[in-house]
Image (cartoon, rainbow, N blue to C red):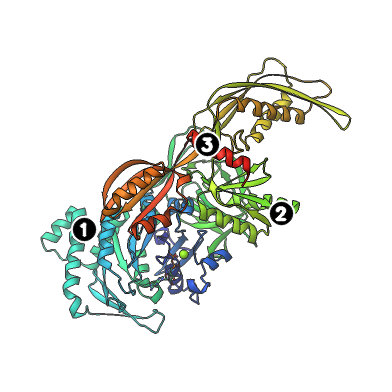
Amino acid sequence: MGHQLERIRNIGLMAHIDAGKTTTTERILFYAGRTHRMGEVHAGESQMDWMELEKERGITITAASTFCTWKDHQINIIDTPGHVDFTAEVERSLRILDGAIGIFCAVAGVESQSETVWKQANRYGVPRLIFINKMDRPGADFDRVVSELHGRLGANAVPLQIAVGLDGEFRGIVDLVSMKAIIWDEDELGSRYTEGEIPEELLGRAEDQRINLLEKLSEINDIFLEDYLEGVSLPADRLISEIREATVSGKLFPVFCGAAFKNKGIQTLLDAVVDFLPSPVDLPPVTGIYPSTGDFITRAPSTDEPFAALGFKVTTDPYVGKLTYIRVYSGKISAGDYVFNSSADRRERISRILRMHANNREDVKSARAGDIVAAVGLKRTTTGETLCDGRNPIILESMIFPEPVVSVAIEPQSKSDEKQLLLALQRLLDEDPTFNVNYNRETGQTVIAGMGELHLEVLVERLIREFNVRANVGRPEVAYRETITEIADAEAEFDRESGGRRQYGRVVMRFEPLPIGTGFLFENKLAGGAVPKEYIPAIQKGVEDACSCGVIACYPMVDFRAILLDGSYDELDSNVMAFEIAASMAYKSGLSRAGPVILEPIMEVEIHTAEEFLGDLISDVTSRMGKIMGVEEGYGGKIISSQIPLRTMFGYTTELRSRTQGRATHTMQFWEYQKIPRAVQEKIVEKTRKGY
Ligand code: GDP
Ligand code: MG
């Protein structure tokens, strides 16, 4: 496929769940001739939602990548998930996209989740088109959605189309650039449409909207303003290039409409992708750092530059094994090449390069700047890592993921299930860096922590279905942690006879609190040869392993330093195991005396509400032990910013809806871990003792 860089579009579709992202992607692939049968989401045969689970639930979980060609342009599409719990996947895809289509429902308008994703895209500076979908539904209101785009998202949204036929009668659009009407045939699955004159009754509105478009362009470009005021003729191609420039620079968001499900508005949207969204060369060079000096360097989007690419997703494919999705920023690679992973400082070989179409694949010989492909053969490259030319290394900005704050306990039913569980979790961890696994020695349970309830539910279902693990699964809970607040010293000696052999090791250690978020540090301050060097790693490991179970309620112990001060050994009877155990004994006795406390995740919660519920919702936040950080004017109401402990927020979505008859929505994200109040800690300890 010999497309020039100018003819590539790397785009994503972003939307609130149910706005029609999957249906729109399906139609795009259909009209661009990539699929021959249209899959319907509701019938469970969508081509993009290929995981069994996604089919059953009709939602998109993994971001699959696919491509198609339209008017001699190659369009690479990354399908991004819509739910907050998968926000890391959304961030990952925004990072590597050149442009996006924001899809909104013509009836529901701007919903809270689309607001979150929109702001994320602002942060990554992604140019966007807006597609107002479901224009066929009764109650569809194009103008209202446009004004919400202005009000709630602060987006300079400018219609390039108006609808023909309202309230269940939607038939087509008026293109405000060409000032022509486009009407779709009902029976030809939308593949045929006719261009004609604007219907009489829409002429006035079309004129008004075109003036609005010209005025918006005038606000952005002074030269255009002069030409417009002087009445210079403004042909379609002049308008298209003005709109393109404004869109690429993020100053304007052109708005289109249609009904994906009714096969209307897709071809015109594809034209817009080609006309208005940037190619890889339209964007500034990507910035990274030079590994040994930390200096900023750049790579221009050109095959003449050294190779640089970013891994943005890892999946396991049943046929070819591990697949690493990469976005190539510069240079070129061929199947069989060695590449340098600059983030992890190691060389890897790419054995095959695949172009992905949902779960089908096509082998290609090489990949170049601007391409999005899947690489086979990269054994140890994970999400967010940079691959590059070893002689010209660069580390592209990596991604930071939020903390996993909700956890669930899993109890394998048998020894073989336990083995299978460990294997499966390792595979899932390769794919998804946003959850973690912890073993609770006291209960024998494996605890996995993730972004939210849905995230965990999906992980658990995959364990059970894909990996056939039989296990009892607990209820989702807050992922608490433990830490210490004081310094304490501890001495521990392990001296035992087992199987006719003595085992011996003794350590003296000091434990010190560290600031929240630091993690665990180990320091060796041993004088002389009190303990031989080969046992030091065992002592560190003894403490590190013990950290999975804190001293209060067996939550992971974090944010402290263990210092090895002294110890003794026996020439004959000491071994690695004895020192590991001695260290874990010191951990237990030392930390219990170091003022241990439980830490809990505090969430940043933003509530959008109609004004009449403001007082009620504020006092509700307070009763959830939350802090009000501010109240602002929002579109059609108020916005409450607050910080609330996660433990009081389970089931909030439902409660908010019933409290306000659906006239308030909220978004929630992790803020920080904080010490839990004494009284609450005591309750947790009591509950742990009783077992539940
Ligand atoms: P996603 O969650 O954003 O991927 O949305 P889907 O594509 O799964 O669509 C959600 C639901 O809306 C499905 O039942 C679709 O059939 C329906 N839908 C999608 N587009 C349209 C449309 O243009 N008109 C109508 N009436 N329904 C649509
Ligand atoms: Mg979907």
Question: Does any portion of residue 382 appear in the rendered image?
Answer: no
Residue hosting label 1: 217
Q: Which label belongs to residue 413? A: 2
**In the rendering, at what x and y percent does residue 679 appear?**
49, 35
Residue 13 falls in which quadrant of the image? bottom left
Closer to the camera: disc 3 or disc 2? 3
The tag earlier along the polypeptide, 1 or 3, is: 1
**Which residue shows up at 65% across the image and 26% down it?**
589
The first of marks 3 and 2 along the sequence is 2
243 w.r.t. 439: above or below: below
Q: Is residue 662 left or right of residue 46?
A: left
The x, y position of residue 631, in whole percent, is: 29, 45
Q: Would you name the residue on which mark 3 appears? A: 681
Dot 2: element:
loop
Using a 10 Å C-alpha cutoff, classify the residue at mark 1 as few (fewer than 14 neighbours), some (14 to 19) or many (20 or more): many
Q: Nearer the viewer, mark 2 or mark 1?
A: 2
What's the amino acid at mark 2? Answer: Gln
Mark 2 and mark 1 lie on one chain; the one further toward the N terminus is: 1
Could you tell me how far apart the alpha carbons at marks 3 and 2 are, in whole angstroms? Answer: 31 Å
Task: Name the front one of labels 1 and 3.
Answer: 3
